[in-house]
Image (tube, rainbow, N blue to C red):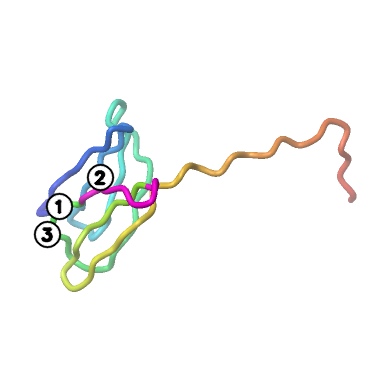
């Protein structure tokens, strides 16, 4: 693996693997959280930063720079009791 790693205060570790993926793992359990194939080799370490109250992760690939927003996850909406499905 040529790319480095970075960890966030929220317990997420980001790194680039040899298959061109930016990967996110839970720092405590090692559980795979997310990955994205960038389609080209990764040699740089990812960086995280905050802008306007939102956190981002950025990594430079062979010819491009990719940035992803680390926003709060979507909240599920509970199904109302007694709601019936129309068949």
Sequence-wise, the earlier of marks 1 and 2 is 2
View extreme (bottom): residue:
63
Q: Are marks 2 and 3 in contact (CB under 8 Å)?
A: no
Q: Which disc, if any, is residue 45?
A: 1
Q: Whole-percent x and y of residue 19?
A: 22, 58
In the image shown, does 67 or 25 lie closer to the viewer?
67
* Separation of residues labelled 1 and 2 (CA atoms): 9 Å
Image quadrant where residue 61 sits: bottom left
Name the residue at the top extreme.
Answer: 28
Does residue 33 show up magenta in the picture? no
Foreground disc of the pair 1, 3: 1
Q: Residue at x 31, y 27 (%)?
A: 29
Q: Is residue 51 magenta?
A: yes
Q: Nearer the viewer, residue 56 or 4?
A: 56
Which percent across, then down, holds residue 5?
17, 44
Q: Quick check: 83 left or right of 60?
A: right
Q: Residues within 10 Å of mark 3 (few under 14, many from 20)?
A: some
Q: Secondary structure at mark 1?
A: loop
Marks 2/3: CA–CA distance: 13 Å
Q: Which residues are magenta?
A: 47-54
Residue drawn at (19%, 43%), measured in percent from left and top?
Answer: 6
Q: Which mark is residue 43?
A: 3
Q: Secondary structure at mark 2?
A: strand
Mark 1–mark 3 Cα distance, whole angstroms, equals 7 Å
Q: Check disc 2: other Cα within 10 Å, few if <14, some if 14-19, many if 20+.
A: many
């Amino acid at each position: 693996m040529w790319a480095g790693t970075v960890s966030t205060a929220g317990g997420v570790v980001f790194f680039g693997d040899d298959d061109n993926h930016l990967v996110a793992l839970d720092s405590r359990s090692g559980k795979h959280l997310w990955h994205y194939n960038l389609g080209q080799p990764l040699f740089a370490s990812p960086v995280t930063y905050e802008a306007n109250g939102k956190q981002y992760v950025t990594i430079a690939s062979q010819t491009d720079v990719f940035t992803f927003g680390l926003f709060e996850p979507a909240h599920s909406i509970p199904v109302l009791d007694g709601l019936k499905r129309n068949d």
